[in-house]
Image: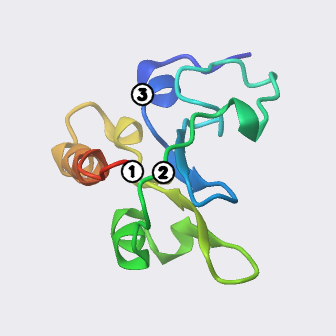
Amino acid sequence: MSLNNFFRINLPYGIKRNEKGEWAAFNREYKPLGENDYMKHVPDEDFIFTNYGELSDRFLMEIADSPTAIQMDDDNVITKVFLYDDSTNPINHGEYDSELWNKYFEKLRWLSNAKSK
């Protein structure tokens, strides 16, 4: 079985941080964007991580779907941020739920403005 729609395969479900402080986007199956085989194991080394400098905790909390949409390591460093969940996923509410789509695309706009180093 694989993901079967453009949104779930090619658009970010969230972003994750590696040990170097670099970030990569992942899709609904926690795979690199474009990967649609949920059975295929994809190691972190196969993700494209980019150095955006230090994304502030405030920024990361703003793009997170909710306070519970953030994962931290043992040192309270944010390591993963989810942009939506099942209840705020725009495709779960019909194609014309403009409020959820606008909220999601606003997060992508904010991320798009992050500058790599």
In front of the other: label 2 or label 3? 2
Q: CA distance from mark 2 to mark 3?
A: 25 Å
Which kind of residue does numbered mark 3 sit on? Answer: Phe
Residue 3's x, y, as percent?
61, 21
Q: Which residue is mark 3?
A: 7
Please, what secondary structure does the residue beneath circle 2 have? loop
Q: Where does the N terminus fall, quadrant-wise?
A: top right
**83 lies left or right of 47:** left
Q: Residues within 10 Å of mark 2 (few under 14, many from 20)?
A: some
Seen at 34% across and 70% down, the residue is 59
For the residue pair 35 and 91, the one nearer the viewer reads as 35
**Of the image marks 1 and 2, the number of the one nearer the N terminus:** 2
Q: Residue furthest front?
A: 117
Q: Are marks 2 and 3 in contact (CB under 8 Å)?
A: no
For the residue pair 55 and 20, the one nearer the viewer reads as 20
Q: Are marks 1 and 2 in contact (CB under 8 Å)?
A: yes
Q: Residues within 10 Å of mark 3 (few under 14, many from 20)?
A: some
Residue 58's x, y, as percent?
36, 78
Which kind of residue does numbered mark 1 sit on? Answer: Lys
Seen at 22% across and 47% down, the residue is 109
**Of the image marks 2 and 3, the number of the one nearer the N terminus:** 3
Position of residue 55 relative to residue 34, above or below, is below
Seen at 48% across and 19% down, the residue is 5
Q: CA distance from mark 1 to mark 2?
A: 6 Å
Position of residue 44 relative to residue 4, above or below, is below
Residue 54's x, y, as percent?
44, 67
Residue 17's x, y, as percent?
60, 56
Q: Please tell me the numbered disc located at residue 51.
A: 2
Which kind of residue does numbered mark 2 sit on? Answer: Asn
**44 lies left or right of 35:** right
Q: Which residue is mark 1?
A: 117
